[in-house]
Amino acid sequence: MTATVPAAAVAPHLGSINDVVQGITSALASLLGAGHGWTPPSAPMLWSMLAAAREEFRRITGFGYVPAGAVTTSGQAMSPNLLVNPGAELGDTAGFGNSTVAVPGWTLTGTPTVVQYGELRNAWPIGLSFAWPSLPAIISFPGINAAPPNGGNQFFGGGNVATSGLSQTVDLSSAGAQIDSGTTPFNLSGYLGGYLLDPSYTTVKVTFLDQNKLYLGSSTIGPVTNLDRWGQTGFQERTSTGIVPVGTRSAQVTVTFHDFNPVVFGFTARYNNAYADNLSFTIGDNLPTPADPQPPASTVGQLDHVFLVYMENKGYNDIVGSPNAPFLNSLINGYGFANNYYGVTHPSLPNYYAIAGGQVFGKTYNCESVCINDPNNLAFNIDRAGKTWAAYAQSMPVGQPLVSTGNYSTDQTPWPAFAGIGDNQAYAAAHIFTLDQMATDLQSASTTPNFVWFAPDEDSNGEGPVSGISGVAHFVFGQLDPRHQYNVAALDQFLQQTVPTVMNSEAWATTKSALIITFDEDNNNITLGIGNEGNHVVTVVIPSPLAVSEGGMRAGAFVVTDRYDHYSTLRTIEDALGLPTMTNNDKYATPLNGFWTGSTGSSSAQTVV
């Protein structure tokens, strides 16, 4: 359907004024470097002056000027806003705007985020042992002065790597009789925006569906382009009105953050600077205000043991079908495979912290020692629940989990970054062991921890081998071109050696257990845009025989298409072991429900390769 065009103020006849304005806009854009991904030093002030002149021009001439109150639906009373969490105020924000987060009430596509007004950007999130400095406020995220009226403290953003989106469905069945009169108006509105000259933009679409979820019509607001904003970081309101189609019983509202960042390669390449805030969808009926969003339902059953292994820095397309990963592809085709799973950030270790602590703690680097003080992390929650946990690290010297030496690095697992573990040798040594110890412990269910994180070293995790000049050269080539897959064979060999250790153990045969194999992030680990797959990674979930027969897990080969990320894995670990959630990220994450028989998610039995 076509949205109603809002009424506009009466303007004097100006002939080809539109052509004139477009010509001026194009000339100014060319002059100021639009589309080149940089901003001249004087540009912010100049853009502000030009924007003020433009608004005065519109006010005087009436061209494109809509006075307050000119956009209306009808004299009919409208419902309250039917969207939950319409302004991103519920849930946690992403530190430095650099990671995806759970967004209560919304279903995610890709890796969108929520950012606090005035958040400073990090100059370069990269896997070093220290953080790069933050950028000045004038070239960071919108400040509170750029927020819409009543914009609150937070806004929706496109995230750090690619086009992304949010959606939620509004139930209109109780207004069916009114809608079927053919006279029920709707109003879709929101503040949409972006960053300086970046051409990325946001659109919001409402799709009207009948009782069978069949399409009846739609309406869209946006975009607000960089020229609409005159190169200023900020927001503009967009509104669309119309009549709800007869037969409508639900409305799906979809927010799409379109990534057109011209910086394809370089510092923080492809950051999606499309923004939205104060979204609203109303109809002409006396519907109640929607309730606050609830955490997604979980169908995850109780397990005795959960095993987790993180491989590193390989995107979905680097692994699926790769001749260098025959073992991992056999698992993809033999067990449950999540083909819509995402890492939450770059670089590597903050993705580990997402599992260990339910957030990335604002980290844009890899901590080599204690950098997080979180008394409610996963390890301590396991302790408090009277359960056990252990990490098993390849190449670690016996009893020395807090000292990097040889091929062992303390950041192979997240735990040394947490206060109470990384600064407590006795506690760390009682929980972080050599990889060889895992086979010994798994000989009996009684000596097998409830949660196990086993980790390869740099030579085997997907980054290396990096020993010697040849290894370093191969590593550099692999960073510059993901098609250079020398390190894929190494990670596949590691899995071929360790996965049978788990699955052939006494503990696996006699308990309800699950093994989760995933990757921390795609190849864009140095955030230069190389190997960017939107942080789409491979994840396989393997159940033990008793987890199938007694724990409700699905057997055989199948593909789960629901969107998941590392917070989904954390929520699954918590639900399976009876642990509390830690943050809004795991609380509102969708668990890996598709791997249990009680799931209502979408999946199919099929071969991937």
Image (cartoon, helix red, strand yellow):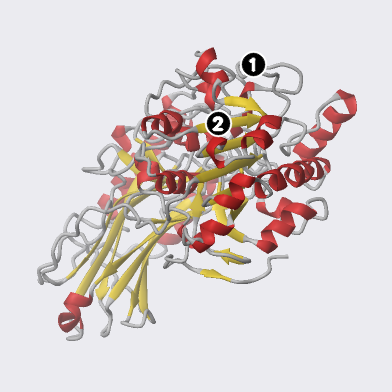
* Residue 104 point in image, percent of width and height: 33, 50
Pick the front one: 140 or 433: 433
Q: Which residue is mark 1?
A: 400
Q: Is 417 on the left or on the right of 375, as rendered?
A: right
* Residue 287 point in image, percent of width and height: 14, 68
Pick the front one: 248 or 121: 248
Q: Is 436 on the left or on the right of 30, as rendered?
A: right
Pick the front one: 343 or 311: 311
Q: CA distance from mark 2 to mark 1?
A: 14 Å
Disc 1 residue type (three-letter): Gln
Tag 1, which secondary structure?
A: loop
Q: What's the residue at 20%, 74% (across, down)? A: 185
Mark yes or no: residue 535 visible: no
Give me the disc on residue 147: none
Q: What's the residue at 50%, 14% (across, down)? A: 424
Q: How many marks?
A: 2
Disc 2 residue type (three-letter): Ala
Where residue 45 sits, quadrant-wise, is top left
Q: Quadrant of the C terminus?
A: bottom right
Above or below, 437 against 555 in this view is above
Q: Which residue is mark 2?
A: 390
